[in-house]
Image (tube, coloured by chain):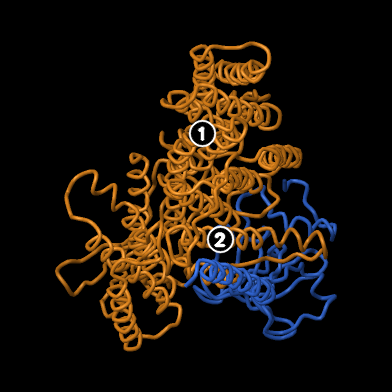
Amino acid sequence: MISLIGFLSLVFAIGINFYLLLSRYIFKFKKQRFNFFIRLSSLLTLLSFFSLMYAYVTSDFSNYNVFQNSHSDKPLIYKISGTWGNHEGSMLLWLCILSIFSFFFSFTKNIEDNFQKLTLIIQAFLHILFGLFIVLTSNPFLVNSILVNEGLGLNPILQDPGLAIHPPVLYAGYVGYSIVFSIAIAGLFQNADDEWLYVAKKWSLISWTFLTGGIALGSYWAYYELGWGGWWFWDPVENISLMPWIAGLALVHSLIMVRGEQAIKKWIVFLSILCFSLSVFGTFLVRSGILTSVHSFAADSSRGVFILLIFFIITGFGFLVFLLKEPKKSNSLNLLFINKVSALVINNILMIIATLTILLGTIYPIIIEVLYNKRISVGGPYFNSTVIPIMIPGFLLMSIAPILSWQTSKIKSSKKYALSFIILSIVVLLQSYFLNFNTWGFVGLLLGLWIILASIIAILTSYKIKFTIKFFQIINPHIAHIGVGIAIIGITCSSVFQNELDFNLSEGDEFNVNGKKVLFEKIETTNETNFQALRGKFLFNIESNKINEIKAGKNYYPVSKIITSEAGILHQWNRDIYFILGDQKNNEWFVRVLINPFVSFIWLGVILMVYSGLIAVTRR
Amino acid sequence: MSLRFQRLLLILFTLIIIFSAVLLILYNTRENVSYFYTPSEINKSDIKINKIIRIGGFVENDSFKKISSSSFEFRITDEKASILVTFNGILPDLFREGQGAVIEGMFVNNDVFNANDVFAKHDENYMPASIKEGLKDTGYWNKKYK
C-alpha cells in the first residue's frame, strides 16, 4: 500500500514537471501558479521518498527493495539509512534532493521573474530525466513476488552512523550543482544582466560546502571503518567526488572575479556546466559498474546505457547551448603579472589541470582496455605524484592571493611576507633535518605553515580587528585558506610520518608503543542486537595514572554472514593511535598498531573550510 | 614592467605549468600502472620477477594455510592454472576459500608470488568487473555472480 503511494506520487511529480516543461511553449503561467506547481512536484517527490523510508522503517517486505536490503533486526537508524544504502533508493534520494533545491530556488527574491522561471524549467527537465531513469530502470517500489517475513539484510559495512549521513550530504553537494547548471543555462538564454551571477555564486557556495562535508564524512568513515589506517585511497569513487569538488572550487573563485571583470562570464558558465556534468558522470559512472569500486552496487547493463544517455544529454545540451549562445559584452581582462585577476586565472588553470589529471587516471584503465585489451589498474602513487606537484604552485599562491590588488601589481608590505617566508623555511628545514628528513614532508609542512602564517599576517596588517559579523565576513577568505593550510599539515604528517608496528601477542602480554607501555588485557566476545562482537581490550600507557582503554576487533553479522573489522582508535590532539586486531594462531594474536600524527588536523581544516563556506553564503 | 611584458610572463608561466603537467602524466602512467592477469595468462607469458602486477581469480579450495597469526599461504586459481601466493599481514574480512580475490605483489621466484595487498570482493554476489571479464574468457564463470 505504502509502496503504491510512493510510486504514484513519484509518477505524478514527473507528470507535473512535463506539464511545466510544456507550459513554456503552450500555456503561459503566472509566476505564482508556476511556483505552486514546482513546489507541489517537490512535495510529491518528498512524499515518495518518505513512503520508501516508511516501508523500510516498518520492515514492509512486500516491497522488493526493502526485502533485498533490510532486515527487521536492524537498529532503527540503519533501517532509515537503508533507504539510500542501495542503488534504487539512492537514486530516489538524488531526485528528492534535486526537487528540494528547486523548491528553495522558487523562493529566491530579487531576480527577474522570467529568469527564475527558465531556471526552474531546466530543473524540471532534469527532474524528468532522472525520474524516468528511476521509473524505467531502478524502481524502488517493485512488489515482492514471493511472500516473505524476513529480509536479506543491509551490507554490514554500511551499518555505521558515519555512513548513514554521508550519502545525503554528498548528494546535496552533487545535486546542488544542478541548480548552478540551470542558472548558467538560463543566464545564457536570457542574456540577463549580471544579477544571475550573484545568485549562482550563492548556490555554488552551498553545493561546494555540502560536497566538502560529504567527502570529509566519507573519508572519516573510511578511516575508522575500513581498518586500513588511511583515509584516502584514490578509489575511483573518491576521485570522482574530488573532480566536481576541485572544479567547484574553481567556480567559486571565478565568481569572486565577477566583481571586477566581465569577460570571465563565459568561463563561469563553462565551469557551471562542467561541475554538474562531472557530478552526473561521477555518480552514474561508478554506480553503473563500469568502474570497479567499493561503492558500485551490483550492476545491470541496461542501467549503464541509460546512465550514459542521461550524461550525454545533459553534457551535450549544456555545452551546445554554451557554444551557440555567447554572453554579451566582453571587456578584456585586467591581467597583470601579479594582481588578483591573474592569481585567480592561474588558480583556475591549475585546478582544471588537476581535475583533468584525476579524470585521466580514473578512466585510463577503461581506455587501455578498449584499445589494447589489457587490464590495468592505476593506483595511489600515480595520483600522488601527479596531482600534488601540480597543486603546489597554487598552494604557494593562495597564501597571499586574497590581499592582492585588483588594479595594480603591487603587494602591500611585501617585504614582511618575504622575510617571514625565509624565516619559516629555515625553521622548518632545521626541524625536518633534526627529526627524520623527508622531501615531501618538508614541502608539505612548509606549504601548510606558510599558508597559515601568511594568512595571519594578512589579517593582522590589512584589517582592523573587531569582533563583529562583518569582520568575520571580510576575513573569511583567509579563514578558508588557513583551513587548507591546517589540512595540508595533517595530510602531510599522517601520510609521510605514519609509523607501523606489528606484534604477535597473547592475552596478558605487555608491549611498547612509542615508549608507552601497553597491556593486551583480554579478548572478549559479546552479543549485540544484530551482530556478535569480538574485541581485544588494550590498556594504553599503563604506567601513568591516566590509562586509556582501546578496543579493537571484528563484528560478525549472522544475517549476511559477513565479518567487518572494527579498528580501535585513541584520539590525541597531535596523533591517533590506531589498533587493528588481526588473525590468531595458538592463542597468539596478530596486532598492528599505526601511529598517525596530526590526523585531527585534517578534520579541523575541513571544519574551517565548511565554516567559511557557510559564512560566504551569507555575504553578498 | 610594461603591461604587455607582464602578460607575456603570465602566459609563459601557464605554458610551463601545462607542459610540466603533461610530462608528469606521461611519466607517471608509465611508472605507476600495474597490469592485471588471471593465473592462466601468467603461465603463458613470461612474467618478470620483481615487477608489481595484479592477479585476479578465486582462492582455491583447501589451499589456505595459516603459517602464523600474520603469515598465510594460499593458491589463486581460475580452474586452468593456479599460483602459490604468500602473504604477510591482515587479510581482508571478506577473504575466504572459493571466493574471488585480487592480489597485488610480485613473483619472488618462478613459482611463488608474494602479495603485498589482498583485495577481496565486496559481497556474496558481487564481482569486480575486471575479474569477471577475465573469468569469462577462461570459461570459468559461475552464473550466480551478477
Dot 1 surroundings within 10 Å: few (below 14), some, or many (20 or more)? few
Chain A shade: orange
Q: Earlier in the sequence, mark 2 or mark 1?
A: 1
Dot 2 surroundings within 10 Å: few (below 14), some, or many (20 or more)? some
Most distant residue in the left direction: A545
Q: Amino acid at mark 1?
A: Asp
Q: Which residue is mark 2?
A: A349
Subunit under mark 2: A
Q: Quadrant of residue A67?
A: top right
Question: Would residue A99 be visible to someone looking at this image?
Answer: yes
- Look at the numbered disc 1 and give the secondary structure of its residue: loop
Q: Residue at x 29, y 50 (%)?
A: A474
User: How far is the residue under mark 2 from the one under mark 1?
Assistant: 27 Å
Q: Position of residue A277 (x, y in %)?
A: 62, 44
Most distant residue in the front direction: B2
Q: In the rendered image, what is the letter of the chain coloured blue?
A: B
Q: Report the number of numbered marks.
A: 2
